[in-house]
Image: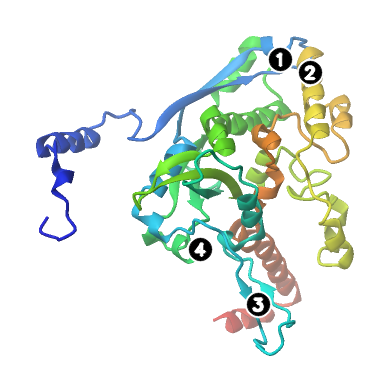
Amino acid sequence: MLHKEFEQEHLKRFSAERENKRLDDAVNALPGESPDGWSVGSVKLKLPAPKVAVPEVDAPEFEVSGILYRPLLDVLVEAFQSPDFLQYHTTPFDLRWDPKHNPDDPDTPILNVDVPAYTSHSMLKDFNELPQTAEPYLETIIAAYMFWSDSTHLANFGDASLYTYFGNQSKYTRAKPISKAGHHQAYFPSLPDTIIDFYRSLFKVPPSPEILTHLKRELMHRVWDLLLTPEFIHAWVHGIVVKCYDGVEHRIFPRFFTYGADYPEKVLLATIKYFGGCPCPCCYIKKEQIVDMGSKADMRRRSNLWTDNSTWRETIERVRGWIFGKGWLIGGAKVTSNLKEKLWVPTRNVFSKLAEHGFDLFSMFVPDLLHEVELGVVKSFFTHLVRILYCVGIETVDELNRRCD
């Protein structure tokens, strides 16, 4: 209070008794109540049944309640009004490297360093495409959402966490746990076991594995539907005015840049069949072409990317009409044949709500080195090599252990 920059105006109408009571009330929240800043929601899943023809709008529903989540805009405002904002890059820029650095030769080629989000081509493109606002005096900022989740991380508790980071912050800061750059966003519940008895009570038969898998996909996207509120979509298009930590108002446009998850969760998010005809959530590489990985042909195939287009969405709507309206089997030949050789799934992708505003959901999936490489390909490859060594002779395994010591 004795600091020269302290303003006594800040203490007007301040009551220490009132603030202490607020802290006590927050600590003494009753069990079952949502923590401060969190919302508790519920979603309803439409239940299909084979040979039961009923329009989707009239189909029976199963409610999943007690879903904890935080609105996306709340996390944005919290982050940009925190002291971390002083480390945020509010304007993207080109970062270039001149390997030779010859000032006498202006034609020396330079390389773009496309590593941080705020120097990426994607963020520069989005920034240049921002709409002109009615308040030119407000600085416009892109809030680069970067989501990370793991469907196996909290398997012991039955839920998976979703965390939000912002690409406006340096990756070196985000990577430090002490920086607390991750914002807890939501919990994805698993499909309750009670759904089996509920389903049997309605249709006199238990749900098939295909139906349970379908409902798991539906649950994931219904939870995301709680997050993609009309207010958030309005902010996506028109921006949201926030008085940031620097005391200046800015118009912030949220954008989704990356979504990191393990492969089973990516499949749920991309609404493609698990290890199906085209197992990659980013491109149309077929399963039988995976063995060509690293070849020139493979690099050409990777340029054929998934896109969120009207053909895909119309196909899903048509097939869902048959599943509910005609009682077709979800895993039946009629449904599978209409979902193309890529083996799409009959689930509406909630991220398609942003398609009309120029967002392609397939562009945000990024490799998860921990689960897809270190605990995935590399672990399987190394395990197979050890089995080969055991077949050759136990002394080769001892030699491997010696070299790894």
Report the residue marked by disc 3: 397
What separation in Å lies between label 4 and label 2 (alpha carbons)?
A: 45 Å
SS for dot 4:
helix
Mark 4, Cα crowd under 10 Å, few <14 / some 14-19 / many 20+, is some
Q: Earlier in the sequence, mark 4 or mark 1?
A: 1
What separation in Å lies between label 2 and label 3 (alpha carbons)?
A: 58 Å
Residue at position x 16%, y 37% in the image: 19
Q: Where is residue 176 drawn, in percent x and y?
A: 42, 63
What separation in Å lies between label 1 and label 3 (alpha carbons)?
A: 59 Å
Q: Earlier in the sequence, mark 2 or mark 1?
A: 1
Q: Earlier in the sequence, mark 4 or mark 2?
A: 4
SS for dot 1:
helix
Q: How is the image coloured?
A: rainbow
Q: Where is residue 143 drawn, in percent x and y?
A: 52, 48
Mark number for residue 56? 1
The amino acid type found where label 4 is placed reads Lys
Q: Are marks 2 and 1 in contact (CB under 8 Å)?
A: yes
Relative to 400, is 77 on the left or the right? left
The amino acid type found where label 2 is placed reads Gly
Mark number for residue 321? 2
